[in-house]
């Protein structure tokens, strides 16, 4: 029987990063993946393929809508080759997954393909695709089995017309009318992909606004911009029925007044969140406790109720984000090595990769008000930046929230071009407990989008922004 210092179950961003860090620290490490492709949801059917389609559709949208204003004339009809677009997405995924395989080999990590399940707290059975079972021994185990798309009890997801994000990444045609159930990150990103390609897109959201976990100012601005692009929204609507008849999908939803609306389309994307995935793990045989929400219970060291077993990523509490899982994977590896790592969960940024992009870190205005924390706010619109006007990306703003007494930055919220990258400056500043004045006194290159951060910091510092 093969024996390892650390066995990681699941090869998503949390799992493969945990395995790499364990190997770097000198542990004899193995990783178990049920599919024949490493990288988990993120690399195979999540973050990476969706961004590939977002970029491809963005190029098409710009060619149709904006090239002429830049003096670029294209003779003839601009056409979509969806099959080729999907093929490019697949190639990007294959290249990225190949990179993970390279990293496993480089770090001498043993890879097992199959379903990992506990026999007890130190033995794991790996059931392979051919039905055979291999048993291995693990001194320590890291559970990184991730999550799966959630649904509603009455919805029959047939994966043809009533689909999840997985199927939305490989459609054979552009929908005529895509009905998105859920106004969160995944639904909006994939909704925008097909909106750009010519689909009518309707979003039905149970709560009173889209991206409800983010600052309400971001939600309001994103709604305005996406409406301008043609997306339709039905917020404060509870879905009551989703059914298919041939190639038609009917969605009925009830608003706050009890009125029923009926939407008819050819596809419906069910995007109501994700659930922790522990199917087949046999966690109980190892004494690992799973709570009523399906999450594996862990302490502050990400240690489960069994001392030599840890859990990270989507399968534990907290935001379901790839980079959060990566931080936790490194954290556990370093705990096992006797180090004293640290994660500040308040400084894990969140991003929506629509265009304009949405990014945030720290506390929202609503959270600060609820906690009774006195704060000051400074905002700066991208339309006031020379760089934004030069590129034509003038939607959005940067908003900085700072403590009213100490001026320490408590939250940064932004929507606009390239904010997915800009948010790193805010994370860095907050990690070192910078004040709004600290940021305002840092030189930012001109002309850049990052100047909006400096100007928002100036606005939060005695309302002294320079360019508005």
Image (cartoon, rainbow, N blue to C red):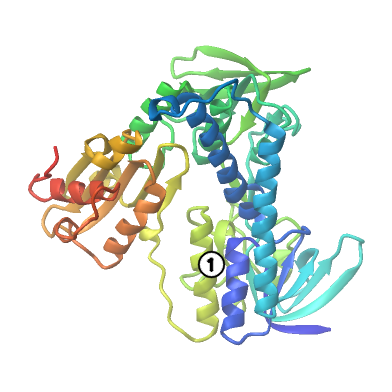
Residue at the (14%, 45%) spot, across then down? 459
Q: Is residue 130 above or below residue 350?
A: below
Q: Is residue 81 above or below residue 351?
A: above
Residue at the (39%, 26%) spot, across then down? 69
Q: Is residue 9 above or below residue 315?
A: below
Quadrant where the C terminus is found in the figure: top left
Q: Position of residue 344 (x, y in %)?
A: 38, 65
Q: Is residue 219 left or right of residue 454?
A: right
Badge 1 crowding class, 10 Å Cα cut-off, few under 14, some 14 to 19, many 20 or more, is: many
Q: Position of residue 380 (x, y in %)?
A: 21, 41
- The answer to which quarter of the image holds residue 21 is bottom right
Q: Is residue 224 left or right of residue 154?
A: left
Q: Nearer the viewer, residue 365 or 371?
A: 365
Q: Nearer the viewer, residue 317 or 22?
A: 22
Q: Please name the residue that numbered disc 1 is placed on.
A: 298
Residue at the (56%, 34%) spot, across then down? 57
Q: Position of residue 341 (x, y in %)?
A: 43, 77
Q: Position of residue 159 (x, y in %)?
A: 74, 34
Residue at the (40%, 22%) spot, across then down? 228
Q: Is residue 235 visible?
A: no
Q: Secondary structure at mark 1?
A: loop
Q: Is residue 133 left or right of residue 406?
A: right
Callout count: 1
Q: Nearer the viewer, residue 297 or 173?
A: 173
Q: Nearer the viewer, residue 152 or 414?
A: 414
Q: Is residue 273 above or below residue 252?
A: below
- The answer to which quarter of the image holds residue 312 is bottom right
Q: Is residue 157 visible?
A: yes
């Amino acid at each position: 029987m093969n024996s390892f210092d650390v066995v990681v179950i699941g090869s998503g961003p949390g799992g493969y990063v945990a395995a790499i860090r364990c190997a770097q620290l000198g542990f004899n490490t193995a990783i178990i993946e049920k599919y024949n492709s490493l990288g988990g949801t993120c690399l195979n059917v999540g973050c990476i393929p969706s961004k590939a389609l977002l970029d491809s559709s963005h190029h098409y949208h710009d060619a149709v809508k904006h090239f002429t204003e830049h003096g670029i004339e294209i003779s003839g009809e601009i056409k979509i080759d969806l099959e080729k677009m999907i093929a490019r997405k697949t190639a990007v995924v294959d290249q990225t997954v190949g990179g993970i395989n390279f990293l496993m080999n480089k770090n001498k990590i043993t890879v097992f393909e199959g379903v990992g399940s506990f026999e007890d707290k130190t033995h794991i059975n790996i059931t392979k695709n051919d039905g055979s079972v291999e048993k291995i021994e693990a001194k320590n185990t890291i559970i990184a089995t991730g999550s799966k798309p959630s649904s509603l009890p009455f919805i029959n997801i047939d994966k043809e017309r009533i689909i999840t994000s997985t199927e939305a990444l490989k459609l054979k045609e552009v929908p005529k009318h895509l009905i998105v159930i859920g106004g969160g990150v995944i639904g909006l990103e994939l909704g925008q992909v097909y909106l750009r390609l010519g689909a009518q897109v309707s979003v039905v959201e149970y709560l009173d606004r889209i991206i409800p976990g983010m600052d309400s100012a971001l939600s309001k601005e994103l709604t305005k911009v996406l409406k301008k692009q043609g997306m339709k929204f039905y917020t404060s609507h509870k879905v009551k029925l989703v059914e298919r008849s041939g190639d038609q999908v009917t969605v009925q939803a009830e608003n706050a007044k009890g009125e029923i609306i009926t939407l008819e389309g050819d596809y419906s994307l069910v995007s109501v969140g994700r659930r922790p995935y522990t199917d087949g793990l046999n966690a109980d045989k190892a004494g690992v406790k799973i709570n009523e929400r399906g999450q594996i219970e862990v302490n502050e060291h990400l240690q489960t109720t069994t001392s030599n077993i840890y859990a990270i990523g989507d399968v534990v509490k907290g935001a379901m984000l790839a980079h959060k899982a990566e931080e936790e994977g490194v954290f556990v590896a370093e705990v096992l090595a006797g180090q004293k790592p640290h994660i500040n969960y308040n400084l894990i940024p969140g991003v929506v990769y629509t265009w304009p992009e949405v990014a945030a870190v720290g506390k929202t205005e609503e959270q600060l008000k609820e906690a009774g924390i006195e704060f000051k706010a400074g905002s700066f619109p991208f339309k006031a930046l020379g760089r934004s006007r030069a590129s034509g990306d003038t939607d959005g703003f940067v908003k900085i929230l700072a403590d009213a007494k100490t001026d320490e930055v408590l939250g940064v919220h932004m929507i606009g071009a390239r904010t997915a990258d800009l948010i790193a400056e805010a994370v860095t500043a907050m990690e070192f407990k910078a004040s709004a004045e600290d940021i305002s006194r840092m030189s930012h290159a001109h002309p850049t989008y990052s100047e909006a951060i400096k100007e928002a910091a100036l606005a939060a510092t005695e309302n002294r922004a320079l360019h508005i």
